[in-house]
Image (tube, grey):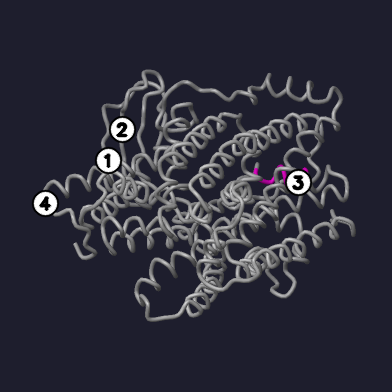
Amino acid sequence: MNFFNGADWLVILAYLLGIIGLGVWFGKDQHNTRDYFLGSKNIPWWGIGFSIVAAETSALTIISVPAMAFGGNMTFLQIIIGYVIARILLAIVMVPHYLKGEIYSPYQLLENSFGHSARRLAGGLFLFSELLAAGVRVYVASIPIKLMFGDKILGFGTGDPILGSILLFVLLSLVYSYVGGVKAVIWTDAVQFGLFMAGGLFTVFYIPTLVEGGAAALFAKAAEAGKTHWFNLQFSLSLPFNIWMGVIGGTFVVLSSHGAEQLIVQRVLACKTVADGRKALALSAVVIFPLFLVFLLVGVMLWAYYQQAPMGIAIPEVKPGSGIKANDYIYPIFMMTAVPHVLKGFLIVAILSAAMSSVSSALTSLASVSTMDFVKPLWGGKRTESFYLSFSKGSMVAWAVLLIGVAYLSREVEYVLNAAFSLRGLTSGALLGSLLLVLLWKKGRALPVVVGTLTSLFVMICISQLEWTKSAVSDELVGVSLAWKRFTLFEWTKATPVGDVVKGSLAWPWFTLTGTIVTIGTAWLVRACSPKDDSPRADA
């Protein structure tokens, strides 16, 4: 069945050509790595602020946030409160450190305080986790894109529509990222943010026109079913989302993602002054809450709409372990079957823009860390700036190839998919903890930081496999198990509980906080047991 006409394809083609042309135009005149990775430090703060939000918003976000509200309610909004708090804290505390001198990544601060090994370990963890995470984001976004564009178009030249979708995202993003570096990425991200925000707002105002009674009728039906519920005061380490998970856990998630991971920090580093850096983060704090609110409302309204209207096409069968849920197809199906032509093209562009912004952000961050944290320190002043610029561009191509490989393997090898989904949460606490030690200790040996980081990674791997059992009647803990695949590593069970039991595990918003505590606690213990020496050394 063909869901698009010539006008839809014209909109999509105009977007693809326009965004590539825009990126190439803004990214011209790249003479050195400062231009390529810092955008010559002449990008306005508001452009950087919008690009921060675009970089953290993937196509999966655009389709899965409505899916959460469609299948549950709006309690995820509590997590966004923490996202806002973290940006304010980073603007106050970390931005002055980022913009003191010419810094290309947050891991440079680790070297200044603790030596080469601390910097390389943190940079290596970022490269590994970001490659896997970005590859999986591309693969998962390719699944609904395949549904929307069809096998014939995406399979052209490869015979494999998923591979065709992966190549579409990565290669188109590579074109303007390769030519223009971070400046091209920031400006195209700012435009792409406007596109997917406009797409969400359009949907919120369009759905009420399709039903009798309009928005009032939709929200009345949704409220009756509990879909508009958003506040949960009951503390819990496991799901469902609650306000404590948002204010505490969500804050630490973004303290790491926006304060210790190059994907976002590279944008703040492109600011000219501390004031600009703070304004960019403040703008992203202002924008992020309404963005998620809009797409949660889309999910609520879609649920109410489909209570009285048939689904245009059947939801495709979901492969177990694919990383996507049945409800993730709801919004794409609505776009394809219930939106008029031309407007349909613009909504498809909203998803494409979110996908491409996350890919281009990953490519520039991977290239900058590999060049500026590994290659340039290794060769020092033995090479010219033109060499490092050429290497930066070559490394970006290499990372694009690896990204395609990871995305493809995510479909073929379930272990790669599972590892990529969990790894970001496992490393985020270690990265944040090591950066907080820079603020706490100022100077010191690398050994405590390295041991703390590696211990945190090990502990978080164990915690990610930990599961507990509680009595549904008394909420009493009756069992704990630690298993890997089919092997049970540890199991404790109390006397058989009376009545039903409820299984739980640590929810992802708590991962970063837990990993941070382990990193700092272990580093502090190792330092206390080591000889007193506050000078940074790379080999100790």
For marks 2 and 1, give the CA distance. 8 Å
What amino acid is labelled 4 in the image?
Lys
Amino acid on which the number 3 mark rests in the picture: Ile
Q: Which mark is residue 491?
A: 1
Which portion, as a residue range, is magenta?
328-334
Mark 1 Cα shell of 10 Å, populated few (<14), some (14-19), many (≥20): few
> Do labels 2 and 1 touch, CB within 8 Å?
yes
Q: Are marks 3 and 1 in contact (CB under 8 Å)?
A: no
22 in magenta = no
Question: Do the residues bearing badges 2 and 3 touch, measured as CB atoms within 8 Å?
Answer: no
Q: Which mark is residue 532?
A: 4
Three-letter code for the amino acid on which mark 2 is drawn: Gly
Q: Quadrant of residue 219?
A: top right
Helix, strand or loop status at disc 4: loop
User: Is any atom of residue 135 visible in this view?
Assistant: no
Q: Secondary structure at mark 2?
A: strand
Q: Position of residue 187 (x, y in %)?
A: 65, 56
| Residue that numbered label 2 is attached to | 479
> Which residue is the site of mark 3?
333
Look at the magenta stretch and give its main secondary structure: helix
Q: CA distance from mark 2 to mark 3?
A: 42 Å
Q: Is residue 16 left or right of residue 109?
A: right
**Could you tell which of marks 2 and 3 lies nearer the N-terminus?**
3
Q: Quadrant of the N terminus?
A: bottom right
